[in-house]
Amino acid sequence: MPTPRKSIEQLKLSGSYQQNKKRYDNRLTTIPTIQLPLGRPPTHLLPAERLVWAELVRVAHPGLLARSDRLILEIATKLVVRMRTTDAKTSEVNALMNVLAKLGMTPAARLKMNLEPLDILTTEPTATINPWDALDELD
């Protein structure tokens, strides 16, 4: 199995990007695609599953999820509900991690996707930012 490609950030840290910028041009140019919005959760989901759907949409990188991701997001939703309500098997937790990686919701997956970092300070210049405000789901 071949070694996975390094992200642009990893190449910059190692110095390879500065030496061979032309080699990585194809990774920097993106092909515009038309993405339909994700939409509301499916009507057949249970209320707890709808809440998890909304949570996953809220924590995903903005603009990452589209209509074509609905089925895999539904799988992730059901696995998260199963993990939170029952004793999930190791295979189910592994399946959840795999699905979250495919959705770009793990740190390693985000590195591979070369997503633009969100600059919170430029969106709200006058607001004081408390990093603990983002942890409102812990109740």
Image: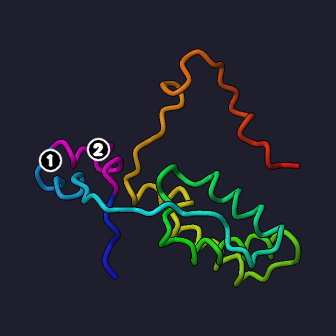
Check the image and name the residue furthest to the left: 22
Q: Position of residue 20 (x, y in %)?
A: 13, 49
As drawn, the label of residue 21 is: 1
Q: In this orientation, which residue lies closer to the viewer: 54 or 82? A: 54
Figure check: 121 above or below 23: above
The reply to whether callout 1 and callout 2 are in contact (CB within 8 Å) is: no
As drawn, the label of residue 113 is: none
Q: Position of residue 129 (x, y in %)?
A: 65, 24
Q: In this orientation, which residue lies closer to the viewer: 121 or 16? A: 121
As drawn, the label of residue 12 is: 2
Q: Residues within 10 Å of mark 1 (few under 14, many from 20)?
A: few
Check the image and name the residue furthest to the top: 126
Q: Position of residue 93 (x, y in %)?
A: 71, 76
Using the numbered discs, state the Cα–Cα distance from disc 1 to disc 2 in whole angstroms.
Answer: 10 Å
Question: Given the image, on which type of amino acid does mark 2 rest?
Answer: Lys
The magenta stretch spans residue 82: no
What residue is rendered at 51% in x and 27% in y? 123
Q: Residues within 10 Å of mark 2 (few under 14, many from 20)?
A: some
The reply, left or right, for residue 89 in relation to residue 28 is right
Q: In the figure, residue 133 lies in which quadrant?
A: top right
The reply, left or right, for residue 117 in relation to residue 130 is left
Q: Position of residue 3 (x, y in %)?
A: 33, 72
What residue is rendered at 58% in x and 78% in y? 71
Figure check: 19 above or below 100: above
Boundaries of the magenta span: 7-18
What residue is rendered at 24% in x and 51% in y? 28
The magenta stretch spans residue 10: yes
Figure check: 58 above or below 76: above
SS at mark 1?
helix
The reply, left or right, for residue 80 in relation to residue 102 is right
Question: Given the image, on which type of amino acid does mark 1 rest?
Answer: Lys
